[in-house]
Amino acid sequence: MQISSRFTIAVHVLIAIETFKNDYKATSEFLASSANVNPTVIRRILQQLKKADIVTVKRGSGGADIERPLTEITLLDVYNAVEPVENGQLFHFHEKPNELCPVGRNIHKIMDYRLEEIQNAMEEKMRRITIADVMADANKLIEN
């Protein structure tokens, strides 16, 4: 399992918007140059963040702004905005295990609750870390 780069790019975008808010318009081109990705990727991510009420986006070259206080945006909020999971399940189970096999017949009973516990632990940890926390770390590093 690997989470795509959309999540880390989305966090990067939020930190860049906050860092440069007084000096530059946060356009998709500007943010793309910071993340070193195509502006189209940034536009898609900004639209996902907008849909989740995390950013506002002005048409044309108006740029993006963060909608809510950083203390009210968690990593889980960002993750849910840009990495929507199918049926609320992080792990995708293989289709139709062989019911005639004792392992295939029981694999869901063996694994489902474990996978749910892992997902819950990850989401709980992400729920406790805000973009303000990440921004504080970024400010320390940027100042040095």
Image: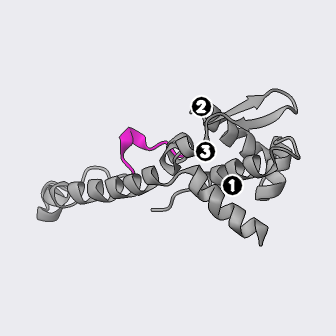
The magenta stretch spans residue 10: no
Residue occupying image coordinates x 17% and y 61%: 110
Which amino acid does the dot numbered 2 rest on?
A: Asp
Query: Would you call the spot at circle 2 few (<14 residues within 10 Å), some (14-19), or many (20 or more)?
Result: some
Q: Toward the viewer: 12 or 96? A: 12
Q: Which mark is residue 12?
A: 1
Query: Would you call the spot at circle 3 few (<14 residues within 10 Å), some (14-19), or many (20 or more)?
Result: some
Residue occupying image coordinates x 44% and y 50%: 127
The magenta stretch spans residue 88: yes
The answer for how far apart the CA atoms under marks 2 and 3 are is 12 Å
| Position in image of residue 134 (x %, y %) | 60, 58
The residue labelled by disc 3 is 70
Q: Is residue 1 above or below residue 19?
A: below
Magenta stretch: helix, strand or loop mostly: loop
Residue 91 visible in the picture: no
Residue 11 visible in the picture: yes
| Position in image of residue 27 (x %, y %) | 83, 41
Q: Which mark is residue 53?
A: 2
Which amino acid does the dot numbered 3 rest on?
A: Leu
Quadrant containing the N terminus in the rendered view: bottom left
Q: Are marks 1 and 2 in contact (CB under 8 Å)?
A: no
Q: Secondary structure at mark 3?
A: helix
Which amino acid does the dot numbered 1 rest on?
A: His
* Of the image marks 1 and 3, the number of the one nearer the N terminus: 1
Q: Toward the viewer: 94 or 72? A: 72
The answer for how far apart the CA atoms under marks 1 and 3 are is 13 Å
* Residue, far top: 59
Q: Secondary structure at mark 1?
A: helix
**Scheme by which the image is coloured:** one colour
Residues shaded magenta? 83-91
